[in-house]
Image (cartoon, rainbow, N blue to C red):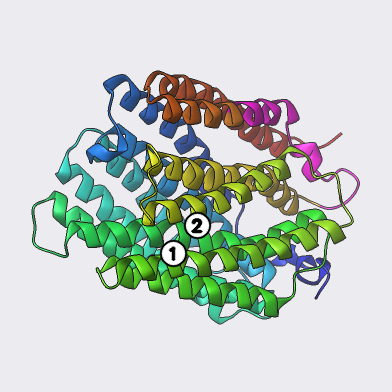
Amino acid sequence: MKPIGAFIGGAKGRLLPRSIPLRFFGAAVAFHLLAWAALAAGALQGAGFSQGLGWPLAALHLVTLGMLGMCAIGAGAQLLPVATRQSAIGPRLLSAIWWLYTPGVAVLALGMGLARPLMLVVGAVAVALSLAGWALLMAGNLRGARGMPGVVAHGWASMAALALVLASALALVSVWLGLPGPGRDTSLALHLVIAPYGFMGLLALGLSYILVPMFALADTPDPRQQLTSLVFALAALGLAAVAAFGIATMPLRVLALLLGAIAVVLHLRLMAQALRSGMRQALGRSFTLLRISWAGLLASLGLALAFVLQVPVPRLDQWFGLCLIGMWLMSFLLGMLQRILPFLTAMHGGSGRRAHTPSSLSFEPALRVLFVCHLAALALLASSIAADSRWPVLAASLVGAVGALAFATFYGVLLQRMRTPRN
């Protein structure tokens, strides 16, 4: 194991121009608010996720492509070169990707919300081209990586999963357009597994091996154990992908979930070791959100197993979606982003007595509001599922929007402080 300083040392020489990652993170902040607005629109219409195109589906993709996708591009393009001790590449291409990806996500979500297939396909093509361009940049970073084999392997696996995600997404778009292609059930089953657990999940797990030790001031976890966890995860994803094509569906899915659970337990054991051994123990609300996200990940696997075994739990698919997207991915992102933004911004600043520190750039009152609102919104969504009522969804959307506005305030204050010399 290596100390955190082994890959942070000299990091300033491996940074992109600060406007590039900040614009991706800024777009993620905006899409966070738009996702709650889309969910509110769906609640007012009484629409549900099972009804195909509509505002709930738009809200889901504003979270996955808008929030998570934007942060994946920004964090992957910047943190991977820092961690693997190489110069960041492709600032011009990243800028072009932002200009294509941002309106692409907006048009895609609008096409879903308004049920306009042609608008949807325009957005989908823009998103697919953007993600393909980013994958090429990531491949360049991964090829030149020095050290951190576990993180690099997770990066390669995530890029392979991204290829499957794009293929399944375009197949679903062709179904909505009435064009010939793979069956909807196969494409949807593949998409629902590989997108959250494969592309987003593997990237989140890999970056956690950088971020958690960095913020806890701990040694990096054992690379061999990182790779062992990854092998189990890839085996699980492979079996789930085969099952999506109707081959031994139930036994393969059960085995995939068991292997996935082993992968997650191994990963969480490494995270717990890093937190126990870290020099910084008081990690605050951001790591409370991270722990909630880990609980959501484990719960999603348990609910998925219940779904495969056809356990008669009312609205099981909605509970699964809440744990997978709301508890795991959103909580992970919000917890990490409030740490990453001040850290990267401070790294871009000057050195010396008047240089900004991450704590001097952060705005804690806004983060307190975000924390309370995010948890309240999740609780309200859970109550709506339990009561089978749309009105708690509307309340959750309003509370979540307040939290999103607080997060936007945090981001705005950070930008303002970044431009102001420290006293």
Position of 240 relative to 352 (above/below): below
Task: Where is residue 380? Give x, y as percent.
Answer: 51, 25
- Asked if the residue under mark 1 is in contact with the one under mark 2, i.e. CB atoms within 8 Å, the reply is yes
Say which quadrant the C terminus sits in: top right
Q: Position of residue 1 (x, y in %)?
A: 80, 76
The secondary element bearing badge 2 is classed as helix
Residue 183, quarter of the rendered image? bottom left
Whole-percent x, y for residue 228 in the image: 62, 77
Q: Is residue 135 visible?
A: no
Q: Quadrant of residue 106?
A: top left
- Residue name at image x 45 percent, y 37 percent: 31
Callout 1 secondary element = helix
At label 1, the amino acid type is: Trp
Q: Residue at x 15, y 45 (%)?
A: 118
- Answer with mark 2 or mark 1, whichever residue precedes in sequence: 2
**For mark 2, what is the residue?**
73
Asked whether, in this view, residue 305 is left or right of residue 57, the answer is right
User: Which residues make up the magenta segment?
Assistant: 351-373
Dominant SS in magenta: helix
Q: Callout 2 environment at 10 Å: few (<14), some (14 to 19), or many (20+)?
A: many
Q: Residues within 10 Å of mark 1 (few under 14, many from 20)?
A: many
What residue did someone put label 1 on? 134
State whether residue 348 appears in this view: yes
Of the pair 257 and 90, the residue shown nearer to us: 257
